[in-house]
Image (cartoon, rainbow, N blue to C red):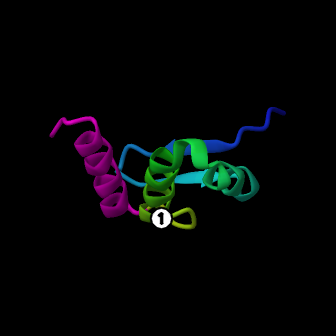
Amino acid sequence: MKHFDIGANNEPNGHGTVAYNKVKLESILKNKSNEIEAQKLQALLQISNVVVGDSIANLLLIEAILFDLDMSV
């Protein structure tokens, strides 16, 4: 079995979850060399719902990523 620090599960009905290693995330957030990117990552993970796949949260997550990339739906 392989272990990853972050993983995503999407379902055809719009539901899905994002799971992540909290210890790894905290070490990334403490690294001040790339503070803006760390804050973006933290914000994205706060939008996602790790317990229940929430299709609205997933839509907001995608919209935030597209905005950061200067793109839109």
Q: Give 35 or 64, whichever is nearer the viewer.
A: 35
Q: Which quarter of the image is occupied by the C terminus? A: top left
What range of the chain is rendered magenta?
A: 54-72
Q: Which quarter of the image is occupied by the N terminus? A: top right
Numbered label tally: 1
Instruction: Kindly state the secondary structure of the residue where label 1 is placed.
Output: helix
Q: Is residue 67 magenta?
A: yes
Q: Position of residue 7 (x, y in %)?
A: 60, 43
Mark 1 residue crowding within 10 angstroms, few (<14) / some (14–19) / many (20+): few
Q: Position of residue 4 (x, y in %)?
A: 72, 38
Q: Is residue 69 left or right of residue 4?
A: left
Q: Give the residue drawn at x 51%, y 66%.
A: 52
Q: Give 53 or 18, whichever is nearer the viewer.
A: 18
Q: Is residue 10 magenta?
A: no
Farthest residue to the left: give it: 73
Q: Which residue is mark 1?
A: 46
Q: Give the residue drawn at x 69%, y 43%.
A: 5
Q: Position of residue 2 (x, y in %)?
A: 80, 32
29 vs 1: above or below: below
Farthest residue to the right: give it: 1
Choose top left, top right, bottom left or bottom right for residue 43.
Answer: bottom left
Instruction: Give amino acid for label 1.
Output: Gln
6 vs 45: above or below: above
Choose top left, top right, bottom left or bottom right for residue 58.
Answer: bottom left
Q: Is residue 47 left or right of residue 17?
A: left
Q: Position of residue 6 (x, y in %)?
A: 63, 44
Q: Name the magenta segment's main secondary structure.
A: helix
